[in-house]
Amino acid sequence: MALILFHMAGAEKKSGRKGGRTSERESGRSERGYAIVALDGPTDPINVGHTLRAAMCFDTRLVVLANPDPAIKLRRLSTDPGRTWRHTPVMSVENVFESLPYNCTPVAIELTDDAEDLVDFQHPERACYIFGPENGSLSEEALKRCDHVLKIPVSLPLNLAATVNVVLYDRMLKMRRPELRPGGNNPRTTR
Ligand SMILES: C[S@@+](CC[C@H](N)C(=O)[O-])C[C@H]1O[C@@H](n2cnc3c(N)ncnc32)[C@H](O)[C@@H]1O
């Protein structure tokens, strides 16, 4: 018992807080928080493969496929040679919002007139980016359930997988370059 009390006192002293639950150790993680990519109703295996590849390259923590076309076979995606599912969890669900973890912000990615501009967007620490199907758009209901609707400011819709790459790159850039973030607060250092 004496030994345990000694350790607890040491922890309090180090963290400056009662209970000693905050570590002073520098995190080895490349960013605070995480990104999830969710495709709502994807139909094209080529796009799904490119999306999985992007997810692995950008260290996305989870990929969600909501109601994917049954022809999409994860083991046979020519555009995902690294077989992302072996390294990054990939889930199939019926409703994209089923997969939303605790305190994660749903962000719809859609080219609508009143969407926020990605260029000026400050990414949430924990974000689930939800993309629409190749042959349509996210439903009004899905857009309403999201905390943000974001567009890449171009005049015509981009290819789905290209959109995924642009959004993940924008997140990575703003995480690494705090001066590019509106408000300038870097989630790596802001507690
Ligand atoms: C190829 S688009 C769908 C086609 C589009 N609805 C149309 O009118 O032709 C597939 C998905 O990519 C995303 N997307 C494509 N271009 C976008 C842009 N400029 N800004 C935001 N999302 C975009 C959206 O999630 C969209 O639902």
Image: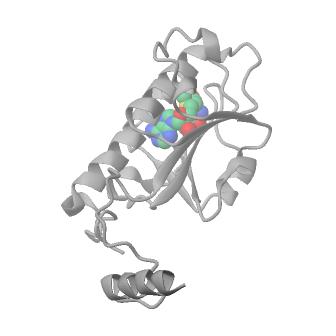
What residue is rendered at 38% in x and 31% in y? 57
Marks counted in the figure total: 0
State the residue lying farthest toward the right: 94
Image vertical order of residue 101 relative to residue 163, above or below: below
The quarter holding residue 66 reads: top right
* x then y, percent, for residue 65: 67, 33
| Residue 156 visible to an observer of this rendering | no
* x then y, percent, for residue 117: 40, 54
* x then y, percent, for residue 127: 52, 54
What residue is rendered at 31% in x and 53% in y? 28
Image vertical order of residue 149 relative to residue 167, above or below: below
182 and 138: which one is in front?
182
What residue is rendered at 68% in x and 16% in y? 72
State the residue lying farthest toward the front: 2
* x then y, percent, for residue 84: 52, 24
The chosen color scheme is: one colour
Q: Is residue 52 left or right of residue 90?
A: left
- Report the quarter where the C terminus lies: bottom left
Q: Is residue 42 left or right of residue 165?
A: right
| Residue 97 visible to an observer of this rendering | yes
What residue is rendered at 64% in x and 17% in y? 74
- Report the quarter where the N terminus lies: bottom right
The quarter holding residue 32 reads: bottom left
Q: Is residue 187 left or right of residue 53?
A: left
Image vertical order of residue 141 relative to residue 96, above or below: below
